[in-house]
């Protein structure tokens, strides 16, 4: 309860700073007040097209995160067990982590078009993060714990499900949380540049063209709420690996 109160206080102080800055600027076209943004925020849910835009962007983000998470986790586990494979993946992951997002977006717009570009961009940005998170987690497992488990059961499948995955489940969750924040930013930027239909990125671009900066702030506020909801969902979801770990302890 105390933690919730501190969080509410922090948000309240941010709104006070925002209100003070808006009063100091005294030009809603440049910096709208919190009241103007909240009114624009309410208009988003009144307009019929807005809900479609929100749902499509959330769907793209979910699919992009899923497409990056599945191979990222699997290949990260493989690399953790096979040093040769890890060496093979190292230059690929390095290139994906260092290539400029804007350059990759322009290339993909030419090759894939404005519909598929947000998916590809999200995948290429999130896959290295998830892969390296899982790979690093396996390498950081206490070797003594592995030795103890091998004395009891040296089978690979049971070792993976009852030992390795429970030990790295928190690292996987952390990688997913980090990927969520980055993925949302990258997805919106890709939608903005690609002018993808039914997207928040295009809605923000339309608001910019029409100098509706209160709507831009409102869409930004909505994106923050979406990110928080996704984070709460991931934090409160209990992975199957944790259930397996508990069942194993009971035995």
Image (tube, helix red, strand yellow):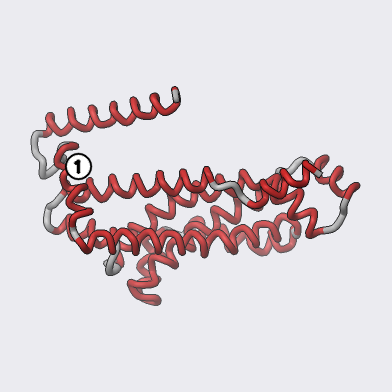
Coordinates of residue 37 in the picture (x, y in percent): 18, 43
Which is nearer the eye, 93 or 11? Answer: 11
Task: Please tell me in which quadrant of the rendered image residue 203 appears.
Answer: bottom left
- Give SS at disc 1: helix
Coordinates of residue 241 in the picture (x, y in percent): 67, 50
The quadrant of the picture occupied by the C terminus is: top right
Residue that appears at 75% across and 60% down:
82
Residue that appears at 23% across and 27% down:
16
Q: Which residue is mark 1?
A: 38
Which is nearer the eye, 167 or 17? Answer: 167
Residue that appears at 39% across and 76% down:
112
Query: Which residue extends farthest right?
Result: 151
The quadrant of the picture occupied by the N terminus is: top left
Coordinates of residue 184 in the picture (x, y in percent): 39, 53
> Relative to residue 107, is residue 146 depicted above or below?
above
Which is nearer the eye, 39 or 118? Answer: 39
């Amino acid at each position: 309860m105390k933690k919730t109160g501190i969080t509410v206080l922090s948000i309240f102080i941010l709104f006070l700073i925002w209100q003070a800055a808006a009063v100091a600027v005294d030009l809603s076209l440049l910096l709208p007040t919190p009241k103007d943004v909240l009114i624009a925020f309410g208009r988003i849910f009144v307009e019929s097209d807005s809900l479609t835009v929100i749902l499509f962007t959330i769907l793209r983000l979910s699919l992009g995160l899923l497409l990056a998470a599945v191979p990222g986790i699997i290949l990260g586990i493989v690399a953790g067990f096979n040093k040769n494979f890890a060496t093979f993946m190292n230059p690929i992951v390095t290139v994906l982590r260092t290539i400029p997002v804007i350059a990759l977006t322009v290339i993909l717009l030419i090759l894939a078009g404005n519909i598929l570009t947000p998916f590809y961009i999200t995948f290429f940005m999130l896959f290295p993060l998830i892969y390296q998170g899982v790979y690093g987690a396996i390498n950081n497992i206490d070797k003594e714990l592995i030795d103890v488990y091998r004395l009891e059961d040296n089978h690979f499948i049971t070792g993976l499900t009852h030992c390795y995955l429970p030990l790295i489940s928190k690292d996987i969750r952390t990688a997913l949380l980090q990927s969520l924040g980055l993925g949302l930013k990258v997805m919106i930027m890709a939608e903005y540049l690609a002018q993808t239909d039914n997207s928040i990125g295009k809605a923000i671009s339309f608001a910019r063209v029409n100098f509706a900066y209160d709507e831009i702030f409102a869409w930004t506020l909505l994106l923050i709420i979406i990110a928080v909801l996704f984070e709460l969902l991931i934090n409160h979801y209990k992975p199957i690996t944790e259930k397996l770990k508990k069942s194993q302890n009971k035995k």
